[in-house]
Amino acid sequence: MKESVSVRGAIYRYRKDGTPEFLIMRRSLESDNNKGLWQLPGGKLEGSESRERAYVREMKEEVGRHYVNRFKRGRIYLGTVSYLHEEGTKTFIHHGFMQQAQPHGVRLKRSSEHMGHVWVSYSELKQYAFVRGNAELIRRAHEHLVQPP
């Protein structure tokens, strides 16, 4: 059975009231799959690339080099989420990371892969239809923020 391995970043910042919010991006309606669904920034591993290297590369591609350079230190690995494709022909594996972003002065990179982005609190997530596995990674990140180890 084939595998599709990717990295996802639960990038967060804090609102003025102290509530954490997460960056989610809406897939383009021209995408090959998951058209119009919301997801965390990220993408597939290339070749023998490590998950950490793929994460840094994908964050630069998805949200822009300037934005990635504004990340504070402290990337945290959230583990994996895996699931079988509906047709049963491929297993999808998402390696999740979380990292805090600077709260101001951010301009996201425009991409043909996405048609928009929003920052949402954990309680607002139910308003969005997600690519499978992404909401679970946000749940893990939120849990880490409200109940740190």
Image (tube, rainbow, N blue to C red):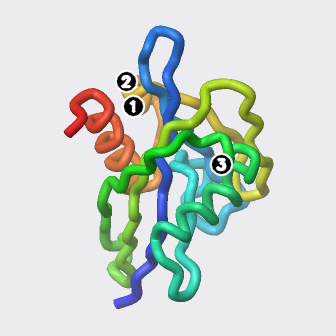
Image point (32%, 72%), residue name: 84
Query: Where does the N terminus fall, quadrant-wise?
Result: bottom left
Residue 103 placement (x, y as % from top left): 61, 26
Which amino acid is tagged 1? Lys
Q: Is residue 89 left or right of residue 128?
A: left
Which amino acid is tagged 2? Ser
To which quarter of the image does residue 54 belong?
bottom right
Contact between marks 1 and 3 (CB within 8 A): the answer is no
Is residue 7 positioned above or below 20 on the image? below
Is residue 2 positioned above or below 101 on the image? below
Which amino acid is tagged 3? Val
- Report which residue position mark 1 lands on: 126
Residue 68 placement (x, y as % from top left): 65, 48
Q: Is residue 70 left or right of residue 101?
A: right
Image point (68%, 57%), residue name: 60
Contact between marks 1 and 2 (CB within 8 A): the answer is yes
To which quarter of the image does residue 20 belong?
top left
Q: Nearer the viewer, mark 3 or mark 2?
A: 3
Query: Where does the C terminus fall, quadrant-wise?
Result: top left
Query: Along the polypeptide, which appears first: circle 1 or circle 3?
Result: 3
Q: Is residue 95 left or right of residue 112?
A: left
Image point (40%, 57%), residue name: 96
Is residue 62 positioned above or below 101 on the image? below
Residue 136 visible in the picture: yes
Can you tell which mark lies on residue 68? 3
